[in-house]
Amino acid sequence: MEKKQSSPSTARLIYILYLIGLIPAAGLIASIIGVVLAYINREDDSSDWLQSHYKFQIQTFWLSLIFSAIGWILTFIFIGYIILLFWLFWLIIRCAKGMKRLDSQLPALGQK
């Protein structure tokens, strides 16, 4: 069975889903859809630079889940709000840089 070749538009959609996941009503559902798409497409017969974005997006999801969980757990003390604020900016910047590198057909940050 042949592997299908994925396109950069799928990777772009995943970054957008992660950003939509910041909206409280859409939250976790959009992010889960994004990570499922990344897992499905990471093994496709696509170029190395595109595969690096799917790996980057999977890492982004799991790190984001950890940061936000720790932040929510620690909201009973002030440090939780600081962690959540850091996580918010971190996710926005990570997605923006990922999309910029995707448009330039470069590997994702920190990926070979």
Image: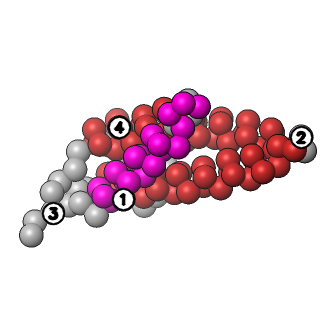
Give yes or no for contact between labels 3 and 4 (Cβ–Cβ under 8 Å): no
Residue of label 3: 3
Magenta segment boundaries in residue numbering? 24-42
Of the image marks 1 and 4, the number of the one nearer the N terminus:
4
Secondary structure, mark 2, is loop
Give yes or no for contact between labels 1 and 4 (Cβ–Cβ under 8 Å): no
> Rounded to the nearest whole Å, what is the CA distance between mark 3 and mark 2?
49 Å
Picture layout, residue 75 above or below residue 55:
above
Q: In this view, does 58 lie to the left or right of 1?
A: right
Residue of label 1: 39
Could you tell me residue 59's position as x and y percent? Answer: 51, 57
Question: Residue, x 56% and y 57% (percent of image)?
Answer: 62
Residue of label 2: 78
Q: Residue 13 carries which label?
A: 4
Q: Nearer the viewer, residue 9 or 110?
A: 9
Q: Which of 105 and 6 is in front in this view?
A: 6
